[in-house]
Image (spheres, rainbow, N blue to C red):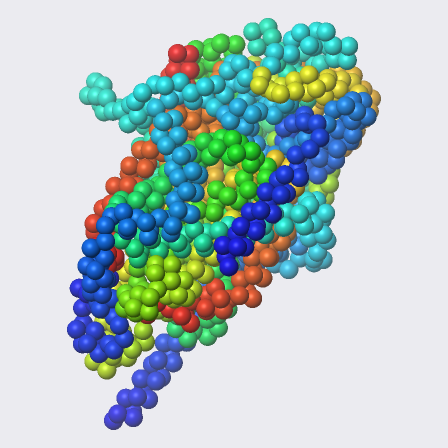
Amino acid sequence: MSKTLFTALLLLTCLLNGCRKSGTEPVVVYLRMGSPVEQGIWREVFSAVKTRHPDIAIKVLNVPYEGYWSKLFTMCAAGNPPDMVMMESGFYQSFVKKNTLLDLTERIQQSRHVHVADYHPSTMEWLTVDGRLYGLPSDTAVILPIFNLDLFATAGVTPPGPDWSWEDYLKIAQKLTRDENGDGKPEIYGTGMPPWECAVWAWGGKWVDDLESPTRCTFDDPQVMAAIQWVADLRLKHKVAFRSEQVQAAQPDFFLNGNIAIAWNGHWAIPDYIAKADFKWDVGMLPLGPGGRGGWNRGSCFSIPAKAKQPDKAWRIIEFICSEEGAKLFAGKNIMTPVHQAVINSREFLNMHPPEHQQYFVAALEHGNLLPKTTAFRELNGMIVMELEHVWIGEEDVPSVCRRIAAKGTELLSREKQ
Amino acid sequence: MSDVLISPKTVSETLHKPSQKSAASATSQSSAIRHTKSAIDEWKTALPFLLPSLTGICLFTMLPLMASALLSLTQWDLLTSPRFVGLENYKNLLGISHVSGHWKASDPDFWKYLWNTIYLMAALPIGIAASLILAMLLNRRVYGHKLLRSIYFLPSMCVPVAVFLLWRWLYNADHGLINWALGQLGIQGPEWVNRSAWAKPAIMLAGLWAGLGGYNMVFYLAALQNIPAELYEAAMLDGASPRQKFIHITIPLLAPTTYFITATSIIAGFQGGFDAAFVITAGGPAGATTTLMYYIYNNAFEWSKMGYAACISWVLFTLVFVATWAHWKLGGRHADQLH
Amino acid sequence: MPTNYIKSHKILVVGQNVITSGTVWCLGLFMLLPLVWMISTALKASGREFELPPVWIPRPAHFENFKQVWLSIPFGRLLLNSCVFAIAVTIGQLFTCSTGAFAFARLKFPGRDKLFLIYLATLMIPGIVTLIPLFIILQYLGWIDTYPGLIVPWLFSAYGTFLLRQFFIGIPSALEDAAKIDGCGAWGIFFNVVLPLSKPALSALSIIAILGTWREFLWPLIITDSMEMRTLTVGLSVFRGAFASDWNMLMAASCLVMLPLVIVFAFNQRFFIEGIQLSGIKG
């Protein structure tokens, strides 16, 4: 009985399988599955691609972020990568240095639709590896402090202008922190934990000796240690920073709930805040530190794997998506910091409110810091994040942790060089 | 089940049904008859039964397993071809050198995560004992026992990610439900997953919640219901106390089930702690809840060091194999009448 | 004297029952709390999920969250895939595990125990490191993004074989010998003696197979490409973005994913849990 059922099921599935294979081979596009809003934009974009290139059939792989890289690595390892991939700067370096992405330099130079000068110069800094380009940018991952203006008003604090410093940041956070019932545990925290990276850069600290080709991790640098100490103090000494479950996790949830007055988040969270926040809010500028402002220079791009079966068609899709026309389709919903100059400087983009100070996203592009260009970047980053938790939970002092990070990091980099 | 385990003689004597004891002797009789058969004949009978599972296990489990053994001898970044490095991965993983009076492991993280894994396995005996006690309570005529069984089974039906996200939030130090409730009672709750000392128990508690009424309880319920009521009745006539009944009837008759549950728990325990830690703590704080399984995942897909991940897996395999073997020597044989 | 003894004994028993019932119920309610919280969250408005003191019964209850979930993902299709996956794997495992377990438990052949040890050993290597080799095999078979690719590797289970073997071993040989005298061969014994006596074990295996497939995330994600081939658990991740989660949606979706399981188990409790006691392996 079960045997016949089993065979019947197998037969059925084989039949279904047989029916699926027909027509021309589509271009396989590997995408990060975004919010329903983002998915809507993509549908628009692909229908525009179809109108422009009726000969191209597209098969979209919308992959949830949890499992995005596992699946991509599996496909690559099996020798059957997709034709077009949405890359992130943290992974881009590894893929490029392992020769697994197609060199697009010539195609970009010869294109009539896209030009290197079309994009904000900062994006080209992380996209360029040894003078060659292996992708075209889609967006920058700018992260800014976001203010709950209602909490500012209740505390009688004026939202800071663009020229505020990290010193001001602490003072404001202290004023915003409120313990209403006096149990020693604030109901409202002045700030979420700011990203330590931003502080390190603002103090003029450097992770490694040479960003282009790092050999030594410089976390024992006094500026780095001072910045880390400062961030840790927010939490441990001044008790104005919210303690989240994963120490470094962004806390949009508790910001939305009104428990945090200043939370750091990226452009991608804007639609969420527009839809959900029942208070007034705005973005702030990156605070000034002893070494200037510290932001990230990182983002996403579109690339073609070297083993792609249909690189030419994939290129035509990228060429369209990254052109002015394509970039404008994405800008409409305010889900990402654009990289195309025509959009960055457009009235449409700058006039999209809220947030009131939309221009800070553009301004922050000027203060981006590159991440070390090494294939070991993710391991290095993972190690640093893990070790720094010793500091955030107050179980170890900053100098000993930073010195350990420097030693471990240098060992890691030298192993990678071999 | 060997007859040694059914110790109260009065009990086994009052039994009229075919007991485990007679079953065991019957097996040895029939195997004596079969002994005349040649090995080829025996295989001829067995092969049709084995074939369906053997084909599948060979193709979809053994083959990838062999591949992973080979991969453990390579460096593989998943993007370029694997590079053969011999035993280098094993050396890097297990190597210990003696440098200027200090023993220095070449991969200290591995030892730390091994310790974490073993620490978290402390929840296993608690979980097994709890599911046994629970099964015994629910096996009695507790008011509404049918509904209760479903309630205890419900967490096993939840999608792990959603459940553990929920726990992450319950554990939040300032705005989590647990500390809020403790606060109402005037107790200052700990920072749960923000402290190395509390993070492991917190992960264990969430894991216990998710697994308490799950498979193990179901297996125990099944096994308990299979114990003939006559045994207990006979024991009661002999004036046995509930404690004696538990020790001399329940425990021995549950032995095969207990063996299965402990064996699979040991295997799962060594590979455990991933789902909960991945969602609740991301392995933190400072690696306090990173288990070997988590380390393997990180190596394989986060840092694309598949060769090293395979190497850790095979070291893990050795550990599990030794543990399973010891477990077999300690008690498994008695639970298995074939030996 | 004796009546007094019995009376006090009865009171003691009743008292004990009340205490145990109370304890088990209290613990049960504690077990239930996170799930109640899940349902409560599913009914809350966006951005209102974290309020303290906790709101157990949201007013107004946002039942439209469930509708929203239904509209955001191709729920019907995902449900179908989940069902196909779960049912096919369950039936397949019942077949392959029971035959295999029969050979290991009731037959005698050279190398049997060594082979069984190998079966056990396959459980000891984490699936993550065998994932890519397995994927390559399925790619070679042309099964990526198809039902066979999703299902076939799961049809065989060393765990299930182990489970059934432990149950089969306990079946009294006297019954087997009686069947032999009646002229039954190995297959006759398998179908007429072992399987009918093992219903509880088979239902236990079904539970494991159904729950295992239903809640699996990584495998369906890796092996399927299109949304049309994915399962409910994978579809759930729409609400868990890369950077933020829609908590109410995620919890509403989790409830919906869980619901078919709850229905199946509630209506078949007799089969799955109660059924086990009807025909046990009497030892």
> Where residue A296 sits: x, y (%)?
60, 20
Point 39% across, 76% down: residue: C17
Point 21% across, 60% down: residue: B33
Q: Is residue A200 above or below residue C6?
A: above
Q: Is residue B66 above or below residue C19?
A: above
> Where residue B270 sits: x, y (%)?
35, 42
- Tally the marks: 0
* Res A106 → quadrant: top right
Query: In the picture provided, is A122 more to the left or to the right than B38?
Result: right
Any part of residue A105 in sight: yes
For the C terminus of chain A, give its image quadrant: top left
Query: In the picture provided, is A196 more to the left or to the right than A33?
Result: left
Any part of residue B157 in sight: no
Point 77% across, 23% down: residue: A55
> Where residue B307 sits: x, y (%)?
39, 25
* Res A393 → quadrant: top left
Query: Front-most of B300 and C119?
Result: C119
Query: Front-most of C117 and B220?
Result: C117
Point 47% across, 57% down: residue: C206
> Where residue A175 sits: x, y (%)?
61, 35
Query: Front-most of A405 and B159?
Result: B159
